Amino acid sequence: MSFDPQNPRGAPRPSAAPTPSYIPPQPVERRPPTILLAAIAVLALFVIAAAVYLIFNSGGPTSTPLPGPGASTSASHVAPTPANSAPPRTGGPTAGASLLPTPEASPATPYEAFLRHIPAAIRPSCTGGQATGIEFTTLCTTTNGIRVIYDQYDTADAMNAAYQETFATVQIDANSGSCEDHSTWPAESTYNVNGAPAGHRLCADDPNGAPTITWTDDQLAILSVATGQATDVPGLIEFWTNEAGPIP
C-alpha cells in the first residue's frame, strides 16, 4: 500500500460528484425581430413627413408668381373695349370694332329713345332742337371739338332724299375719291356694318374750309353730319370710324 502524503491515515477520498443527467432550461433574452423594427422606423418617418407637410401647407394665402419674360398675357390682362362705341364698319370706309351699348332703363319719351342711338361718351353734351321734316334732331360736341348733328327721319327714303340734296351741291360722281385720304376730297362711297351695306358717306370741306363727313344709316333712318377742325382731319376720320355711331 502506497503512502499518500495528503491522506496519511489512508482515509477514503471522496469521489467526484456525478454529472446530472437533466439540465434545466436557461432564461433566453428576447429581442424584437429585425422586420418589425424596420416597419416601426418606416411608420415613424411617414408620421414625421405628414406632420411637416401639414405645418407648411395648411391655411394662409397662396401667392401667384408673376409671368416671367416672354410669358403670354392672360385674357384678364387684356384691356377691354369701351362700351357704347360706334358699330363696326368695313368696306369702303375703314372701321374699328365695338361692343353693344350697355343695357339701360326703358326710355320715358320717344326723344329719349332717339338719344339711345347716340354714343354714351358724347350723349351728355347733346342738345335737342327742331327742324322741318325731321322727327328728332340733336347737336353734340366731343371733347376735342368735333360737332355732330344727328337727325332722325320718319323713313329711310326721307333720310336718303335729304342726303342726296347735300350730295348734289358737291358736284362729284358717286363712289369717287377716298374718305380716308383728305387729298382726294370731296369723296363719296357706301359703307358696311358687319359686312352688310349700311348707308352712304360723303366727305368734303365746307365753305369755311372745315372738314365735314355726312353719312346715312339705312336701318335707323338717321342722317348725321360731323364737322372737325381744319388742322385735324385725321382726328375727324378716326372719330367717324370708331366712335360716331349711331348705335343700333
Image (spheres, rainbow, N blue to C red):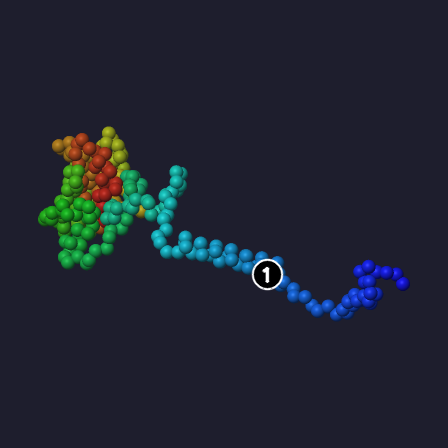
Task: Compare residues 221 and 16 and report the one nearer the observer.
Answer: 16
Check the image and name the residue furthest to the front.
9
Q: From the viewer's perspective, tell me whether residue 7 is left or right of residue 139.
A: right
- Image x and y of residue 225, in percent: 18, 41
Q: Residue at x 61, y 58 (%)?
A: 34
- Image x and y of residue 236, in percent: 21, 37
Q: From the viewer's perspective, tell me whether residue 100 is left or right of residue 42.
A: left
Which residue corresponds to mark 1?
Answer: 36
Q: From the viewer's perspective, tell me whether residue 15 is left or right of residue 179.
A: right
- Image x and y of residue 13, in percent: 81, 66
* Location of residue 24 by image quarter: bottom right
Label 1: state its secondary structure: helix
Task: Compare residues 117 and 100 and report the one nearer the observer.
Answer: 100
What is the tally of numbered marks visible in this picture?
Answer: 1
Q: From the viewer's perspective, tell me whether residue 53 is left or right of residue 233.
A: right
Q: Is residue 174 visible?
A: no
- 163 in relation to 110, above or below: above
Q: Residue at x 89, y 63 (%)?
A: 1
Check the image and name the residue furthest to the top.
183
- Image x and y of residue 109, in percent: 14, 57
Q: Three-letter amino acid code at disc 1?
A: Leu
Q: Is residue 69 visible?
A: yes
Task: Compare residues 15 and 197 and report the one nearer the observer.
Answer: 15
- 188 in relation to 82, above or below: above
Q: Residue at x 39, y 56 (%)?
A: 58
Q: Pointer 1: residues within 10 angstroms few (<14), some, or many (20+)?
A: few
